[in-house]
Image: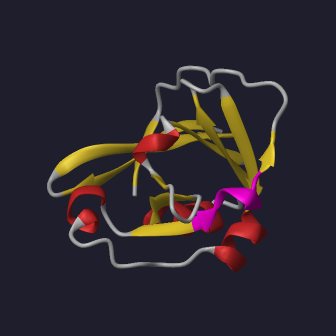
Amino acid sequence: MKQAVYTSINGKKTFLGKHIDDVIYREFPFKTAVLWQDKELSFDKRLLDYAIRSKVKGFVFTDPIKRISLKVGIKALQNNVHERDEHGRSKLMGAQYYFSKSLGEKLIKVKKTPYVKQEVMI
C-alpha cells in the first residue's frame, strides 16, 4: 500500500503523512512541531487511530532540514502519547498527541520518501 494521508482542519485539506507498506512517514522541520522545553513531537490524533486500524507497525518522523529521522513503533506510541492544552494550537493544527523524541530510534540513513499518487482522507 502506498498512499498519502490527509485530513480536514478548519475546512482545509491538510497533509498528515505517507502510508507506505506498514509504516507512516512524516517529513517536516521538527522546529514546527517540537515543544523544546519538553523535547516532544506532536502529530494529529486521527493519524494514530488510522494507523491502528490499518495495522501500521510504526512511524518514521524525518526533519529534512537537519537530516534526522526517528523511528517509533506503534506500540510505543500507543503507550506513551499524551494530550495537552496548547492555548488555541489545536484550532490551527487539529487535536494533537505528544510524545518524547527520546522514544524514537535515530536512523543512520535519512532517505526521502517516494511520491505517492493515491490519497485517503481520514
Query: What residue do we see at 72% from left, 44% from top?
Result: 70
If the image is split into quadrants, where does the C terminus sit? bottom left
- Give the residues in magenta: 99-104
Q: Who's the residue at 68% across and 68% down the image?
A: 77
Image coloring type: secondary structure
78 vs 83, nearest the viewer: 83
Direction left: furthest residue: 11
Q: Is residue 121 visible?
A: yes
Point 81% across, 36% down: residue: 107
In front of the other: 39 or 93? 39
The quarter of the image holding the N terminus is: top right
Looking at the image, is 69 positioned above or below residue 58? above
Q: Is residue 102 magenta?
A: yes
Q: Quadrant of residue 87?
A: bottom left
Q: How many marks?
A: 0
Q: Position of residue 5 (x, y in %)?
A: 46, 45
**Picture quadrant where residue 18 is located:** top right
Seen at 68% across and 76% down, the residue is 80
Q: Is residue 53 left or right of residue 21?
A: left
Q: Whole-percent x and y of residue 22? A: 74, 47
From the viewer's side, name the closer residue of 72 and 55: 72
Q: Is residue 21 visible?
A: no
Is residue 11 depicted above or below 79 in this figure? above
Instruction: Please tell me whether residue 76 belongs to the stretch shown in magenta.
Output: no
Residue 69 % position (x, y): 70, 36
Q: Position of residue 8 (x, y in %)?
A: 26, 54
